[in-house]
Image: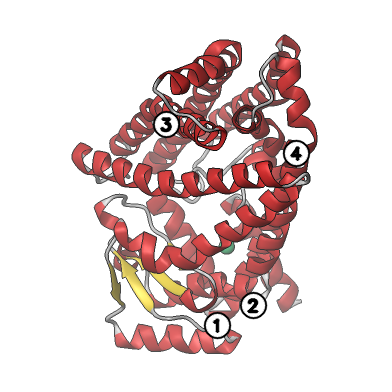
């Protein structure tokens, strides 16, 4: 068991600490230089905010490692004994209850971090939520994700009981379930947290509509979301899949960005659609997911034996949930790499819908409002960022402009 813990530390926790420390020093070194994009005041605030977030990440992962050790040493066995002691019987019910209790304990253990992040966001003026509303959100999220997780565990346990190649069947079932959630998210889940009202501004609606026509994007409406009640940051997205697709503009965005700017931002989002980035992402995500399931199916029974745990279905899944993040940490950069490339392409398309100048100005405006520090260490970009740093995006737009005028 101790060699697994040592390996987890060496290939997961240590790289995370190193990457975040590199990022902290990188930001510190730029924070003392002449500010770019942001004014002096916002530039220092953005630097402090980014550094605090890195420190929280480091502490959170160290605490998680301590929890991992406790789970492996005695937590998993104690939890199994507890569930048996409350009278749950039948292999399936027992495994399912153990898994749900495990998730519930993890949720409670992670609550302090959610609270700390909420407090930090409040201090920096992003979070507009009261403590009561934060608690209501947490309860709602817990119930909804509890239902989804409960269904996923039931599917996994059924597949494990029924098929020899259970991990292949599990992959198909869980992947289809996640796609189904994408379909129902905009119309069923998102409205539980926010109000969505059709966009009133007729000229803007017309312009967005025409923009969507140019790329053949069919949506079931353009909506404004009351994001400002929770967070002051600006955003817009295209949610859902198939017929449930909808354009969602944060009300914060409408207040602060010009119509041309909005067209540039939405043009960027439509660029993803035009270039097939959404489908590519789903396929790539599916491949990564398949690899994780294969690893879980082929190795985790033996890992349970090695740790000294019984090879029950719930134990195999719990150990996988605890250890797989170490693998995903090295797999997600593949996805992020393609995502960053896609961002440059989408920027070009967004610029073609308005102008390069408008898109650049709007991106700068977004960064100003969201107080994003403009620089990031290359290692941090590689491991964490699905979007290139703003400086690189602005430079790429300038380069294209230069090439066009040559
Ligand atoms: Zn994008």
Which quadrant of the figure contains the C terminus?
Answer: bottom right
- Pointer 3: residues within 10 angstroms few (<14), some, or many (20+)? some
Foreground disc of the pair 4, 1: 4
Q: Are marks 4 and 1 in contact (CB under 8 Å)?
A: no
> Closest to the observer: 74 or 253?
74
CA gap, disc 3 to disc 1?
A: 40 Å
Residue shown at 38% from the left, 58% from the top:
234
> Closest to the observer: 108 or 252?
108
Q: Quadrant for residue 179, please give it.
A: bottom right
Circle 2 sits on which residue?
274
Q: Of the two numbered discs 2 and 4 on the same chain, state the one appearing first in sequence.
A: 2
CA gap, disc 4 to disc 1?
A: 39 Å
Tally of marks: 4
Q: Is residue 79 visible?
A: yes
- Where disc 1 sits, the SS reads loop
- Where disc 3 sits, the SS reads helix
The x and y percentages for residue 379 are: 70, 36
The x and y percentages for residue 396 are: 67, 61
């Amino acid at each position: 068991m101790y060699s697994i813990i040592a390996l987890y530390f060496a290939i997961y926790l240590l790289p995370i600490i190193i990457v975040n420390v590199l990022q902290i020093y990188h930001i510190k070194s730029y924070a003392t230089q002449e500010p770019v994009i942001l004014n002096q005041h916002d530039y220092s605030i953005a630097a402090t905010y980014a550094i605090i977030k890195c420190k929280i990440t480091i502490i959170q992962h160290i605490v998680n490692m301590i929890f991992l050790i406790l789970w492996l040493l005695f937590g998993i066995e104690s939890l199994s004994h507890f569930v048996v002691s409350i009278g749950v019987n039948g292999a399936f019910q027992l495994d399912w209850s153990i898994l749900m209790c495990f998730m519930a304990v993890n949720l409670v253990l992670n609550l302090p971090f959610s609270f700390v992040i909420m407090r930090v966001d409040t201090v920096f003026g992003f979070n507009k939520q009261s403590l009561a509303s934060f608690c209501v959100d947490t309860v709602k999220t817990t119930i909804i994700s509890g239902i989804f997780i409960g269904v996923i565990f039931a599917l996994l346990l059924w597949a494990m009981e029924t098929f020899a190649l259970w991990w292949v069947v599990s992959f198909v079932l869980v992947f289809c379930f996640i796609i189904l959630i994408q379909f129902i998210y905009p119309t069923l889940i998102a409205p539980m947290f926010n109000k969505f009202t059709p966009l009133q501004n007729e000229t803007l609606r017309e312009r967005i509509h025409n923009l969507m026509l140019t790329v053949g994007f069919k949506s079931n409406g353009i909506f404004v979301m009351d994001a400002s009640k929770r967070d002051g940051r600006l955003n817009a997205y295209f949610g859902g899949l198939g017929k449930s697709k909808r354009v969602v503009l944060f009300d914060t965005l409408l207040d602060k960005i010009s119509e041309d700017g909005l067209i540039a931002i939405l043009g960027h989002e439509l660029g993803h659609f035009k270039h097939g980035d959404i489908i590519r992402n789903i396929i790539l995500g599916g491949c990564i997911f398949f690899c994780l399931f294969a690893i879980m199916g082929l190795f985790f029974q033996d890992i349970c034996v090695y740790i000294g745990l019984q090879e029950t279905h719930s134990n195999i899944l719990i150990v996988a949930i605890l250890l797989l993040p170490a693998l995903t940490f090295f797999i997600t950069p593949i996805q992020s790499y393609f995502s960053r490339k896609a961002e440059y392409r989408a920027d070009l398309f967004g610029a073609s819908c308005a102008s390069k100048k408008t898109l650049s100005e709007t991106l700068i405006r977004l960064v100003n409002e969201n107080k994003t520090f403009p620089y990031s260490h290359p290692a941090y970009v590689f491991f964490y960022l699905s979007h290139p740093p703003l400086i690189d995006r602005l430079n790429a737009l300038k380069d294209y402009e230069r090439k066009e005028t040559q």
